[in-house]
Amino acid sequence: MSDATIIILLSMITTGLMLGMIFSLVAVGVTIIYGSIWMPNAANGQFFLLAALLLWSASVSWGLHPALAALIIIGLSVPFSYALEILLIRRFYDVPNRNISYFVLSLGITQILAGIFSITYGIWSDQFQLPPLVGGLTMLGPFPMVNNRLAAMLIAALLLVALFTLLRYHRYGRALRAVFQNREAAALRGVDVRAVYRMSFVLGNAVVFAGGVLFACAYSFDFSIAWTMAITAFAIMIIGGPGSVLGALVIGMVFGLTQAAVSIFASPTIAAFSYLGAMLVILLFRPSGLFAR
Amino acid sequence: MNVLTSRWLPHAIFAFAAFAMPLVFSGNRYFAFIVGITLLSVLWATGMNLLYGYTGLMPLMFAGIAGISAYVTIGLSAAGWSFWLAMLVGSIAASLVGIVLGLPSLRLRGFYFTLCSLVIQSVITLAFVYFVNLTNGDVGISHIPLPELPGGGQLTGTSYELVLAALTVIGVVVLTLLVESGFGHRLIAIREDDGLAETLGINVTRQRLAAFFIASLFASIGGALYAPYVGFVSPRSFDVLVSLNIWLMVAFGGRGTIWGPVVGAVILAPLPFLLQDYYMIKDVVYGLLIIGVIVLLPAGIVGGWKRKAAAGEPAPDVAQKTAPAR
Amino acid sequence: MTLLDAKLVSMRFGGVVALSDVNVHQEAGETLGVIGPNGSGKTTLVNVITGHLTPQNGAVLFDGAPLLGRKPFQIAAAGLSRTYQSVRVFSELTTRENIATALLDAPRPLPSEGVAETAEWLGLTPRFDARAGSLTLYEQRRLEILMRLVQQPKLLMLDEPVGGLSSAEVRATINLLSELKARCTIFVIEHTMKVIRELADRVIVLVAGEKIADGPPAEILSDQRVIEKYLGSVDA
């Protein structure tokens, strides 16, 4: 193999890992919310974009350090989620077939946010690019790696590990699984179902925000990322199995690597076609997903 | 039959209004165009109501079907076919596609069907963008020729709006006849409990697919007429937001009633034109409307009235002991 | 004349055996009772016969024609009707609309005088314009039966028709069903032994998916094996 091929291959793998981890993060956020509240949050892509745009404003317009700004933005997602939960989400906790009401509700939120973005950020530019978190290159043998992306990858990996540990071993994670399996039985066993709902909504959105912030650090982006991310996160959730964190992680990584490979060898449209096709097949033949228990 | 006391009185009033409005506004092309788009929206909302209101499925690929019909009709017209023949072929072809796209409803319910329809809509939109030589991709097709008239000349201006009015009135009458027929009663039974309907001998598969075919006919006739009327189509003309707007008309007006979606379309279709000066906030207004309908008006305007009216009647005596069986 | 003949029916869900080599035979006019503990496969048997489940093995003949592979609506049209263990009516529709729905695709619909007479017999006439969901459980149970009777089925399979009813309502239902025997053949799953003892001409006992007994009620209900396996645990 020539050096050029190896460089392409390496960049494909790193891009794939990076994308995969961001996909996994967002999909875990979406699946936590669906697993508990039964809310298929189609607005996740707009939340993702919101975090990315805020980070852009904070670091480019107001001159904050991106790392500090990122932490503040993820922190801000908490009151944001609480407000939404109080205003809209909790009204539907006991509605029959609430997932379809939630789905439409989240499409409404999507419209509102998309409208706000085009009013506020639409005037700026098509592409948003942030200053790097860290500068410089690291040489991996003879091959250069961009430090900024390595840092983003490291943070994403740490976040995923922390999240997975939290969900597997912490009291909240066990309560979440109990609620997902059987809401009534969990309530009978003394789990505060509504508290789990609220916690899931807040945590899920915080994770989506974290994904958006990390993405903005590593790549330039435009408005179209919102819709792409919404569809991708849904596809990952459906294929991995709604409510399955492991499914979201594994399928998210698979999607990231596929996306990286496909965008080198074919057009992104083909990648989108293949996600949608995979999602259709799973919906029709195994609606509980690949990783359902 | 006395028209004034007939159950067709609302239809007569609607038909009168539908034909009068284009004539009233014939002096002002801008207002007449709003009337034309509103009539098309009524036709689309009426078709979606058959699925969303009476069959209980939320089809987010509705606009995609309209788009397939529009592109086929444009393509065939460009190949030298008569517009009307092209529209017939395009509508039937798109409606057959609609049956195929309805197949998932045999396995999926509720949110899963809606999600599936959203995925299908996304695939259709991607296809419209991707197959550039048929659709001219994102650039879209402009200067779509107007339909020709049998006596020579073209269908244009007020006469176009009158044709739209005629088709819309036919659409509403057809939906009324359908839902009052055995077919409509079967659909309602399926909406309420498809398993029980099947146990009572109803062929659920066939009724559902028939509903998809008919609703798709509404979508595709509207799509075929939309293209020359507006003169321009692109994949955005038939994307998921269009499906969602039609859904909003049905849900806002009141699904599962004949007049709810008509009222919804008449209120919502002119909205983008009225908001034109506030173009930027259009999306926000739509989003707020969607949330408002879901939170405040789950049964829609007309549905809400019906419920109020029912509540005003003497309540059925639930506690009443029925005569013990002999 | 043989009306229903199911031979060697086996049904597995993954590794769980729900029915194994079950034979059921029913003559026209004969009331067949099915008893067995929870999870013994009674409802699964009805689901297999009415086309809701496809068994791995076996054959089902109804009125001389094979049923397996036919869809539930076709089986209903062939004159085999069933009710559900938990009551199931179109609760948003009125009683009248429920009845009209049952008449839509009935191959031999009862003429309207017959419908009115049957509704009167079941005591539902005063409730015609009430929403079915607002009816009492006992009324909904009778509406379920009425919706089947307007289709004039040859065989009516009832899945726990007195479930959830008070003892007075159970008594009244037994009287109704014994009059019903003159109108169509009845296959009844029931836990309440009184129902089986008074109505059934013959009883089969299912335990863990296997038929362990088949015979007249008096004989079966005193059979030591049946008592051990089943009746000992339930108030008889």
Image (cartoon, rainbow, N blue to C red):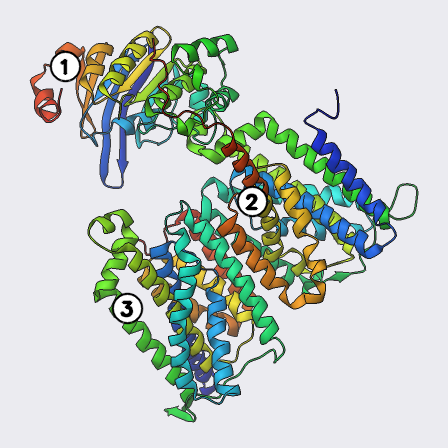
On the same chain: label 3 and label 2? no
Residue C221: x and y in percent read: 13, 15
Q: Name the residue at 43% across, 89% down.
A: A65
Subunit of label 2: B
Q: Mark 2 points at which residue?
A: B300
Q: Tag on residue A164?
A: 3
Residue at the limit of the structure toward the right, as seen here: B152
Residue A180: x and y in percent read: 30, 54
Q: Tag on residue B6?
A: none
- Amino acid at the residue labelled 1: Ile
Q: Name the residue at 46% across, 56% down.
A: A279
Instruction: Give the label, 1 or 3, closer to the camera.
Output: 3
Badge 2 element: helix
- Amino acid at the residue labelled 3: Phe
Badge 1 element: helix
As drawn, A205 above or below C32? below
Subunit of label 1: C
Q: Name the residue at 73% across, 51% down.
A: B37
Quarter of the figure with the N terminus of chain C? top left
Subunit of label 3: A
Q: Name the residue under label 1.
A: C220
